[in-house]
Image (tube, grey):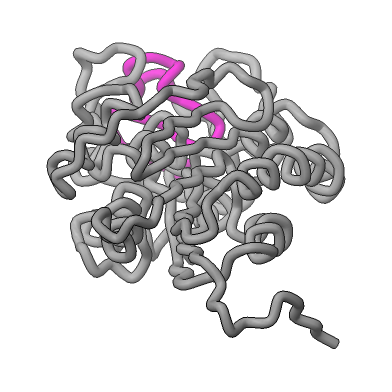
């Protein structure tokens, strides 16, 4: 079970530069820095697709990118856990674990990493910087050497959507890919290097619940449907329905999100077939969500694409 493997190895993996998966905080050093030489003259374009699962990348987006570019490297990727945007997505631009963030602003985090690790100080233009946009491009920072783009269509269109997942992808998501993503790809120079990733995936929410008692949380808002930050272990039969992590080794701020001066000792994730329930509060989850420890939430693309070779045919026909 992926949950048990993460419980056994996650604390070590996120500290390893050669971990078997590339975690989101390792994307810049292990993907961008490994393939891009700022002195080469080629522009680097980082594209982050918020909420994009690996299977959705392979089926929907990869064919669109391969109309102009070829895959140079594709590696197994993982979101940081908890698989939440404010942790895992910010870690992409920061190049470090959340407990080492120096800002909450993605541009400031990116600039700090580029200066510290590549000696670069690009003059970015904030073409777009609005995370309230419901779909399409929400962030676009452009400079002569590097461009950083965030698309938010999968995340915004899956939260609160009761439709079947296949229907959402075949309608809303496909249309945004056709219009927004293709328009960006058409603008890029032919010799661009493109770096694609996501911060987390999505999963359907099971109906059976595990109630987290008020006695082990600083505030009920520290309990979400796929994760709980607790001050103690969950005991008894309910404890067997969760996976427990030591909060101190997860690379996240070890305190309550709602009451910052209260330390947490454990992070709980529901086992397959369960979701978490807040103490003394109504239960009304979206049909699809994230934050937990399932394959669908953790596995994300880590892909580098580059220009086609001159001797490659323009058209490739398969049977």
Q: Quadrant of residue 101?
A: top left
Question: Residue 121: percent from the left, percent from the top?
Answer: 20, 35
On screen, residue 179 above or below 318: above
On screen, residue 69 above or below 296: below
Can I make out residue 234 in this image?
A: no
User: Left or right of 287: which side holds 88?
Assistant: left
Q: Residue at x 82, y 50 (%)?
A: 166
Q: Residue at x 19, y 42 (%)?
A: 120
Q: Quadrant of residue 163?
A: top right
Q: Which residue is more in the foreground, 4 or 185?
A: 185
Q: Residue at x 52, y 36 (%)?
A: 150
Q: Which residue is more in the foreground, 185 or 300?
A: 185
Quadrant containing the C terminus in the rendered view: bottom right
User: Left or right of 71: which side holds 156?
Assistant: right
Query: Which residue extends farthest bottom?
Result: 319
Q: Is residue 34 magenta?
A: no
On screen, residue 176 above or below 191: above
Q: Residue at x 43, y 23 (%)?
A: 126
Can I make out residue 184 in this image?
A: yes
Q: How many labels, in total?
A: 0
Q: Is residue 221 magenta?
A: yes
Question: Residue 19: percent from the left, percent from the top?
Answer: 28, 67
Question: Residue 156: percent from the left, percent from the top?
Answer: 66, 29
Q: Which residue is more in the foreground, 50 or 245?
A: 50
Magenta residues span 213-238
């Amino acid at each position: 079970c992926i949950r048990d493997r993460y419980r056994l190895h996650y604390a070590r993996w996120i500290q390893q530069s050669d971990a078997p998966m590339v975690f989101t905080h390792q994307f810049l050093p292990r993907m961008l820095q490994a393939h891009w030489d700022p002195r080469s003259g080629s522009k680097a374009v980082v594209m982050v697709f918020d909420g994009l699962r690996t299977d959705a990348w392979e089926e929907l987006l990869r064919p669109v990118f391969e109309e102009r570019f070829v895959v140079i490297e594709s590696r197994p990727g993982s979101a940081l856990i908890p698989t939440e945007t404010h942790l895992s997505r910010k870690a992409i631009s920061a190049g470090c674990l959340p407990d080492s963030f120096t800002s909450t602003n993605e541009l400031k985090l990116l600039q700090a990493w580029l200066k510290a690790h590549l000696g670069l100080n690009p003059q970015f233009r904030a073409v777009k910087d609005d995370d309230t946009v419901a779909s399409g491009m929400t962030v676009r920072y452009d400079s002569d050497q590097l461009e950083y783009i965030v698309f938010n269509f999968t995340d915004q269109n899956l939260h609160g959507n009761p439709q079947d997942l296949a229907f959402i992808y075949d309608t809303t998501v496909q249309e945004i890919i056709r219009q927004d993503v293709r328009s960006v790809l058409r603008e890029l120079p032919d010799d661009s290097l493109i770096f694609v990733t996501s911060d987390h995936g999505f999963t359907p929410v099971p109906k059976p619940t595990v109630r987290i008692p008020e006695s082990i949380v600083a505030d009920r808002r520290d309990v979400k449907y796929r994760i709980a930050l607790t001050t103690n272990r969950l005991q008894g039969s309910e404890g067997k329905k969760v996976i427990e992590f030591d909060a101190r080794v997860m690379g996240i701020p070890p305190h309550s999100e709602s009451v910052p001066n209260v330390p947490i000792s454990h992070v709980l994730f529901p086992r397959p077939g369960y979701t978490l329930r807040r103490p003394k509060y109504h239960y009304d989850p979206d049909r699809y969500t994230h934050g937990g420890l399932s394959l669908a939430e953790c596995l994300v693309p880590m892909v580098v694409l580059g220009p086609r070779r001159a001797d490659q045919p323009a058209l490739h026909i398969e049977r």
